[in-house]
């Protein structure tokens, strides 16, 4: 009886040792959020943004109209000017914003919320590839600059809307926002 109880305690200890890191990983992931478009109006003004102080790799997962942040990882990477949008162009972007919802930086996310899949390689030295999928459920990765005052990120869609005088203006629609984890 004593040996059986000892064996049971060992099995429970092993199960706890295995389950604890999994539970911590699951707790670190954010909950799913519904995409709720909110019109912001004119495109961002890139002239007043502070200088970046590092970078953060964000991995998003989406399924139809639900999105969540799977991982936020600081990275030692300097973003070049072509990787950070200057407020022009259309498509899907990830904005870094302050507590007042002011856009500090905008990074293009060309394959975000698409019907193609991002395939991660088994070896880190191989490239990430894309393939078409019948359902809109996938993941995408983006590296954003970190700046003083950064509070959250928002996935936005920027479209050109033409006015009556034949000029096109860029209109930004917020899709969903996520808080940045604090260090």
Image (cartoon, rainbow, N blue to C red):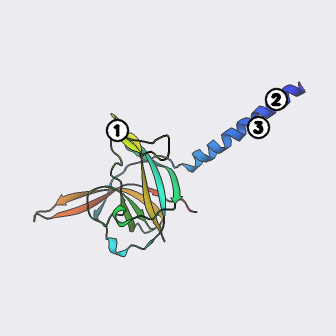
Rendered image: mark on residue 7:
2
Give SS at disc 2: helix
Residue at mark 2 to residue at mark 3: CA–CA distance: 10 Å
Above or below residue 125? Residue 16 is: above
**Mark 1 nearby-residue class (10 Å; few <14, some 14–19, many ≥20):** few
Which mark sits nearer the N-terminus, 1 or 2?
Answer: 2
Question: Seen in the image, is 100 located left or right of residue 170?
Answer: right
Which mark sits nearer the N-terminus, 3 or 1?
Answer: 3
Above or below residue 104? Residue 177 is: above
**Mark 3 nearby-residue class (10 Å; few <14, some 14–19, many ≥20):** few
Residue where numbered disc 3 is placed: 13
At 30% from the left and 66% from the top, the residue drawn is 87
Above or below residue 124? Residue 96 is: below
Residue where numbered disc 1 is placed: 131
Q: Nearer the viewer, mark 1 or mark 2?
A: 1
Q: Position of residue 114 (x, y in %)?
A: 33, 44
Give SS at disc 1: strand
Q: Is residue 63 visible?
A: no
Q: Is residue 114 visible?
A: yes
At 34% from the left and 40% from the top, the residue drawn is 116
Question: Seen in the image, is 24 located left or right of residue 108?
Answer: right
Q: Position of residue 18 (x, y in %)?
A: 68, 39
Which mark sits nearer the N-terminus, 2 or 3?
Answer: 2
Q: Position of residue 77 (x, y in %)?
A: 47, 62
Residue at mark 3 to residue at mark 1: CA–CA distance: 43 Å
């Amino acid at each position: 009886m004593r040996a059986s109880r000892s064996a049971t305690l060992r099995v429970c200890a092993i199960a706890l040792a295995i389950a604890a890191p999994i539970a911590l990983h699951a707790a670190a992931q954010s909950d799913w959020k519904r995409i709720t478009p909110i019109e912001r109006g004119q495109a961002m003004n890139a002239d007043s943004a502070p200088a970046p102080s590092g970078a953060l790799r964000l991995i998003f997962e989406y399924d139809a109209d639900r999105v969540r942040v799977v991982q936020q990882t600081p990275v030692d990477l300097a973003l070049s000017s072509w990787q950070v949008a200057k407020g022009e162009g259309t498509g899907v972007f990830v904005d870094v914003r302050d507590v007042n919802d002011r856009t500090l930086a905008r990074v293009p996310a060309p394959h975000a919320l698409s019907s193609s899949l991002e395939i991660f390689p088994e070896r880190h030295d191989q490239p990430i590839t894309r393939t078409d999928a019948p359902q809109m459920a996938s993941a995408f990765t983006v590296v954003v600059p970190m700046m003083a005052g950064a509070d959250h990120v928002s996935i936005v869609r920027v479209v050109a809307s033409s006015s009556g005088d034949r000029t096109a203006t860029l209109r930004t629609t917020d899709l969903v926002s996520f808080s940045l984890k604090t260090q």
